[in-house]
Image (tube, grey):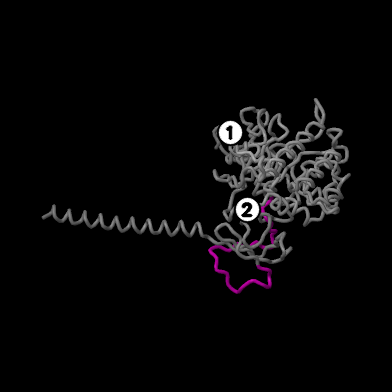
Amino acid sequence: MNNNKSLTNLVGAAKATKKLSQFSLLALACFSANALAESVAITNAEVYTLASKGILSNATVVFDEGKITAVYANDELPEQLSVDKTIDAKGKVLTPGFIASNNLLGLVEVGAVANSRDGAAKKADITFDASLAFNPMSSLIPYTRKGGITTNIVMPKGGDSLFKGQSFAVNLSGDFDSVIASNNGVIVELGAKAKGSRALTLQKLANTLEDADKKLTAKDSKKKSKKEPKRSEVVVNALLAGEKPLLAKVDRATDILALLKLKARYQLDLVLVGARDALLVSQDIAKANVPVMISTIDNLPNSFDSLHGSLTTAAELEKAGVKVIIATSGESHNINQLRFDAGVAVANGLEHSSALAAVSANVADVFKLNSGRISVGKDADLVLWSNDPFEISTQVDTMWINGKQVSTKSRQDALRDRYTSESDMPRAYIK
C-alpha cells in the first residue's frame, strides 16, 4: 500500500516537473523573444539626424530589432508610444555612432610586439584580405568606443606591392560576427620612394588598369580568353566596374592630378587618403567629385610631398565642394580622439554639421554602410552624449550598436579602479 502511494506521488511529481519544465521553457522562449524584439524610445533629445530632418530639439527616436523605426519632432510625437522601454534623454545630444577609418584597429594590439601585428605582410598584394585576422576581442575596442565610435573602416598596410590589400568594415560590438563587410575598398600607395621613382608606381597602376580594361573590352570579341581570371584580375575588374572604391594614399598635388586623370579615363570610384597637398588642387578634386580622407591635426610636413597641410584644410576643402572624411592618424591606439580632431576642424572653420557628417554620414556613403544617419530604416547605431560631442569635457552617456546597448568601460578603467579602490589587501591581490 505504501509502495503504491509512493509510486503515485513519484508519478505526480514527475508530471508536475514536466509541466514546470514546459512552463519554464515557454517563459524562457517568451523572455528571449522579448529581449530580441525589445523596442526603445529615446525621448526629449537634441537629435542631430544628418538627414532631411536636420537638428531636432525635444525629439524622440524609436528603434526596434536593431533598426530605427521612427524619428519624431516635438510636435509630431503621438500621444502614446508602443515600446518596451523609454529613456528620457533630458535634453542630451543624440547623434549617429561615429565611423572611424584609416587605421589598424583589431589588427594590432601592441605596435612594438611583432606577434600582435596582423596588418602587414611582405608578400601582401591586391588580394590581401586582412579581415580574416580581425580580433573583435582586442582590448582597444572598448577604449575606442569611448569616443562614440560604433563602426570602423580598417585599412591594412600591406607589403611591397603597389596595392596594399583591401579594406573592411566592422562594428565595435566586440562580437565575433562584427565584420560588416570585407574587401570593400582597394588600397594603393603612391608618392615619394626612398629608393626608385614615384613615376614607376604611377605607371604600374596605369598599366594594370589599362591591361584589365583591354581584356574586358575584348570580352565579346574573338580575342576573349577562355581562362578563368586570376584573383587579382577579379579585384581590378571590380575597380573598373565601380563596385568598390580605390583608396589612394597620396599627398603631392601632381600625384593627385595624375589619379584624377585615371579616374576620368576609367570611371573609377576614387577616394584620396592623406592628401596633404589637396588644397592646391581643391577645385579639380571637387569637379571630379572625389572624397578626401584626412587627419585634421596631422598638418606638419613629414616629407617633400606634404608641405601644404594646414589646420584649415578640412574647412577649405569643404568650402570648395569636396566631401571630407576625418580620420585619426596612427595605427590602432587613440582612435577615440576622432571627435577631438573634428572639434579642431570646427575651431578652424569647418561647419559643425559638416564635421559631424565627416565622421559619420560621409564615411557611410563612401563605403555603402546602412548607418551614419538617424533616419527610419538605418541601423540603430546611436550615441547619447552629455553635451556637444566635440567638447573635451563631454562624455558618452549611452551607446547602442545595432540597437543593443554596449559598454564603454575599458581595460584602462579596470586598472584605475583596481589601483584606486580602498582595501586592506596589498594591491597585487585586488581584482
Residue 186 is situated, as x and y percent measured from the top left of the image, at 69, 41
Q: Earlier in the sequence, mark 2 or mark 1?
A: 2
- Report whether 216 appears left or right of 277: left
Q: Residue at x 86, y 39 (%)?
A: 254
What's the amino acid at mark 1?
Answer: Arg
Callout 2: SS: strand
Q: Give the residue number, with chain letter if any, for mark 1.
A: 427
Callout 1: SS: helix
Tell me if residue 385 comes above or below residue 111 in the rendering. below
Q: Nearer the viewer, residue 200 or 407?
A: 200
Q: Give the residue number, with chain letter if any, for mark 2.
A: 399
Q: How many marks?
A: 2
Residue 90 falls inside the magenta stretch:
yes
Residue 138 visible? The answer is: no
Q: Quadrant of residue 377?
A: bottom right
- Report whether 33 appears left or right of 209: left
Q: Nearer the viewer, residue 5 or 54?
A: 54
- Report whether 186 appears left or right of 8: right
- The part of the chain drawn in magenta is 72-98
Q: CA distance from mark 2 to mark 1?
A: 32 Å
Residue 315 is situated, as x and y percent measured from the top left of the image, at 84, 51
In the picture, which quadrant includes the N terminus? bottom left
Tell me if residue 15 comes above or below residue 314 in the rendering. below
Tell me if residue 289 comes above or below residue 85 in the rendering. above
In the picture, which quadrant includes the C terminus? top right
What's the amino acid at mark 2?
Answer: Met
Outermost residue on the bottom side: it is: 79
